[in-house]
């Protein structure tokens, strides 16, 4: 963002590798907004939590996300589950890494809210509205800042909330899933299951096109598909039967600069072997307390032929 903030909308399995390839200032990567709790949308949250802590974040990581039809299906329960799952990891880093950077904080909101405010700080306003995807508890987001607007759809079948709340936004991302035939071809689904997945719990290309024709963004971005030339062509042909506006099918490491005058697309070039970015003075000076330790039984197992160097003073 132009105000210095960084916002992550979903962090699915494998996406953290791309994030780290960008070498961001990790002390600013402290907010994740989850559209829903499928692994392809939140599977790398723990990687950003602990990996970002190791790479420069010295404040808590905040995860914003929806409730669901039962408490155990909501974002708060998901975050508590992460804490329990990685308790050994986080406890073992005490005294080495900044205390606050190891904290994980859930901000769960009502998935039924329509245009409800989820976040409002530093001139940025983020609202949510329901999405239609598998179970109760999926949402879409709209971010507004400095007269510009960004919409992130998450996963959803076409729905009334998205049409109403996304109209005339500058930059709109919505899933553009395969056609049923494309899903049969790409993943070998039987015809009935392919139709359910493609057109009842996701949005197929023609549905995407109809949405964008109604919303009329400055730029429509389709995502959530495996890029194959023949499938790309199939999807584009479907979309263009109903929508003739600006369109991009997203790929990994695409980047856009959005201003009131233009939207400029670029391709990120990153090193194959990514090095951690430099940390800040704030990270180096952040409070570290406690010290991870093990039992006398394990301590007695140290090899006497190796003597580590003396510890520097605190």
Image (cartoon, rainbow, N blue to C red):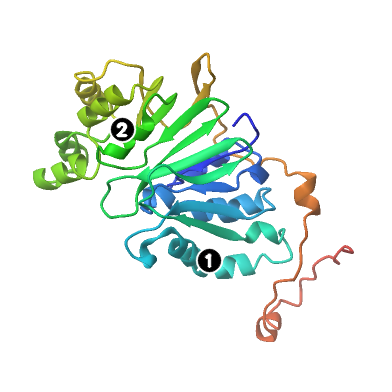
Report the disc number at residue 83.
Answer: 1
Residue at 42% of width from left, 33% of height from top? 151
Q: Is residue 169 above or below residue 90?
A: above
Q: Position of residue 93 (x, y in %)?
A: 66, 64
For marks 1 and 2, the one nearer the N-term is 1
162 with respect to 179 (left or right): right
- Secondary structure under badge 1? helix
Residue furthest to the right in view is 313
Front of the two marks 1 and 2: 2
93 with respect to 251 (left or right): right
119 with respect to 203 (left or right): right
Residue at 35% of width from left, 59% of height from top? 68
The answer to which image quadrant residue 164 occupies is top left
77 with respect to 88 (left or right): left
Q: Position of residue 195 (x, y in %)?
A: 14, 42
- Secondary structure under badge 2? helix
């Amino acid at each position: 963002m132009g105000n210095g903030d960084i916002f992550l909308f979903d962090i699915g399995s494998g996406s953290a590798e791309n994030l780290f390839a960008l070498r961001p200032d990790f002390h600013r990567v402290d907010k994740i907004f989850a559209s829903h709790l499928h692994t392809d949308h939140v599977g790398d949250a723990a990687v950003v939590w602990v990996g970002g802590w190791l790479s420069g974040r010295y404040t808590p990581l905040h995860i914003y996300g929806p409730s669901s039809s039962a408490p155990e299906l909501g974002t708060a329960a998901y975050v508590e589950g992460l804490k329990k799952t990685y308790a050994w990891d986080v406890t073992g880093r005490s005294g080495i890494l900044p205390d606050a950077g190891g904290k994980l904080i859930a901000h769960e909101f009502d998935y039924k809210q329509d245009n409800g405010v989820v976040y409002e700080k530093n001139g940025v306003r983020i609202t949510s509205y329901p999405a239609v995807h598998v179970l109760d508890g999926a949402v879409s987001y709209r971010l507004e800042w400095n007269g510009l607007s960004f919409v992130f759809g998450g996963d959803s079948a076409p729905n009334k909330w998205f049409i109403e709340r996304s109209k005339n936004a500058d930059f709109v991302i919505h899933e553009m899933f395969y056609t049923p035939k494309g899903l049969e071809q790409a993943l070998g689904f039987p015809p009935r299951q392919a139709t359910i997945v493609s057109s009842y719990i996701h949005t197929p290309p023609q549905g995407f096109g109809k949405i964008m024709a109604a919303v009329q963004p400055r730029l429509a971005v389709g995502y959530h598909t495996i890029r194959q030339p023949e499938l790309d062509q199939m999807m584009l042909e479907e979309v263009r039967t109903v929508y003739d506006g600006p369109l991009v099918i997203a790929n990994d490491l695409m980047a856009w600069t959005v201003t009131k005058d233009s939207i400029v697309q670029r391709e990120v070039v990153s090193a194959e072997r990514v090095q951690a970015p430099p940390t800040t003075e704030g990270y180096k000076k952040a409070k570290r307390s406690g010290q991870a330790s093990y039992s006398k039984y394990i301590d007695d197992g140290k090899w006497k032929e190796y003597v580590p160097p003396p510890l520097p003073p605190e």
